[in-house]
Amino acid sequence: MAQINETAVEQNLNIGIADQDREGVVSILTSLLSDEYVLYTKTRNYHWNVVSPHFNDYHKFFEGQYGEIEVIIDDIAERIRQLGGKAIATLDELKSHARLPEHPGQYPTDREMFANLVSDQESIIRNLREDLEKSDKSFHDMGTSDFLTGLMEQHEKMLWMLRATAPTS
């Protein structure tokens, strides 16, 4: 769990969730925010660097995906703020909380790009399943659990689209 100090989570916010439980939820959301930034950056990188006979289609497809992730990032940061937390936003902070791998200096083929994004989406979905359960059962925050359920559904749809669009040969 990420270290959250008193300045990172406002104390005595009276919304029916104990301060320590809000700290736990903010920690979950901080890791998710970091993972979403990695996925966003990777998808944007692929948008810029894809080379394929289907370049135009893939270029536009990746743009649509990173656009959806950008909205998700903003929603997560705002959820953190709603809970009295501070949303991290520097690359160093994001990197230190991310669970998804990066691949610096690599320029994969179009097939590898899709495979990497499929793997990352699956990881995010698995983490969301665990995190939403923990938000509800361990930290007594049904609102965040519901929020994470919605994000999981969005990522499941994005995964479906990735699999349906991925090159087969």
Image (cartoon, rainbow, N blue to C red):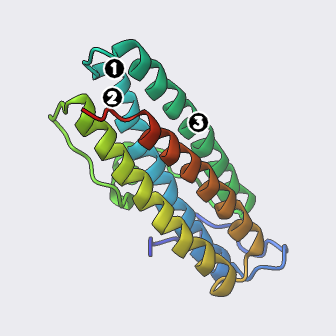
Q: Secondary structure at mark 2?
A: helix
Q: Which residue is mark 2?
A: 45
- The residue located at (34%, 17%) in the rendering is 54
- The residue located at (23%, 38%) in the rendering is 112
Amino acid type shown at disc 2: Asn
Find residue 24 and report its horizontal and vertical position in percent.
Answer: 58, 76
Give the quarter of the image for residue 109: top left
Q: Which residue is mark 3?
A: 68
Amino acid type shown at disc 1: Trp
Amino acid type shown at disc 3: Glu
- Residue 143 lies, with reference to residue 104, above or below; the image says below
Q: Sort mark 1 into few (<14), some (14-19) or many (20+) by Cα contacts within 10 Å.
A: few
Give the quarter of the image for residue 137: bottom right
Give the quarter of the image for residue 139: bottom right
Q: Are marks 3 and 2 in contact (CB under 8 Å)?
A: no
- Residue 99 lies, with reference to residue 70, above or below; the image says below
Question: Toward the viewer: 80 or 7?
Answer: 80
Left or right: 43 with respect to 64? left
Question: Toward the viewer: 131 or 3?
Answer: 131
Q: Are marks 1 and 2 in contact (CB under 8 Å)?
A: yes
Question: Toward the viewer: 138 or 47?
Answer: 47
Q: Which residue is mark 1?
A: 48
- The residue located at (37%, 35%) in the rendering is 166
* Quarter that holds the N terminus: bottom left
